[in-house]
Image (spheres, rainbow, N blue to C red):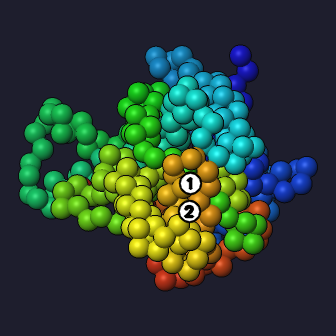
Amino acid sequence: MTIAKVQHYVPQFLLRNFGNGKKDQVWVYDKSTNRSFPSNTKNVASESRFYDFEIDGELNSLEPWLGELEAEAKKVISSILAADSVSHLSVEERLLLASFLSVQLTRTKTFREEWNAFPKMLREHFAKSGDQVEPGSQAEQLIQDHTENETKEQTARIILDAPETYARHFLDKDWVLAATNRKHAFLLSDNPLTRQNFIDSPYRGNLGLKSPGIEIYFPLSPSRALAMWCPSLTDQVHRGAAALVRDGGPSAIASAADPTGVLFMSKALLNGGIVQYTPENVINFNSLQVVWSERYIFSTTNDFELVKEMLDSQPNHKRGPRSKVA
């Protein structure tokens, strides 16, 4: 099998959903240089031989396997966009999409950069704590920098195992389709699977897939995105909707008694329909794309004012997120 040399860490079919015209052109913002430019989708979110590696001198590649997974995921995502709903998805389709998202979580440039940064982070931790690393110990192995091929091989194993490791955590969330319009469009980044959580945790952070209150977002097009919420959040929505109906009567759903749209949101969560986002919701969604991106943001238009404002006020977002060892 001929393996493509240019290998995408964001599927090209997804990039094309944000493209314009027959040439599938997207606008790109480079956080590292603070400039924007147009590009064909085949030239972005990709690197030469990104998923190729050697084991005992033999060439291996994840690219064919990823291509097959993307082809199946494209069918599911296309059906969501066509139906404007997630309610029609079968158990098999949800599992396939959850597997696709699990792989997307681990296949990006950001994930690889985090993996490469881990030995240095451990060395700094040991130096700060004053702990000595015993020669020949497992700790000594962990603090050694990886070669490029070692990084590719190690992350390839994680990617292959990702569906089994993570898919169930996507499946146990409540799925709904977030909707906007072209005037207030969603952005896409080179690390598009984002998370946020407004519940504080005294333990190891609150952005894990299993964390109570976690919100997970994945853009599908400039006007639609998949939102996956912790059931504890959707329970709050349903209880809030029930309280509004109890206090305001059935007419509340069509009146100012529902200023936050909680009744519409509850209905969408129950029937798999869309949750219509306000411009403020879209800003929050897009800010997550900026924060989680490694370097590049993609859009159907050359409007990156939000990105510029965020980077001016928070220059640390010029690169992707990095884990920390306490």
Residue 96 occupies quadrant? top right
Q: Residue 227 appears at what percent x and percent y? A: 53, 53
Q: Quadrant of the C terminus?
A: bottom left
Say the numbered circle drawn on residue 268: 1
Say the numbered circle drawn on residue 264: 2
Asked if labels 2 and 1 touch by Cβ distance under 8 angstroms, the answer is: yes
Q: CA distance from mark 1 to mark 2?
A: 6 Å
Q: Nearer the viewer, residue 276 or 249?
A: 249
Q: Amino acid at mark 1?
A: Ala
Residue 94 occupies quadrant? top right
Q: Secondary structure at mark 2?
A: helix
Say the numbered circle drawn on residue 183: none
Q: Residue at x 35, y 66 (%)?
A: 198
Q: Secondary structure at mark 1?
A: helix
Q: Quadrant of the N terminus?
A: top right
Q: Amino acid at mark 2?
A: Phe
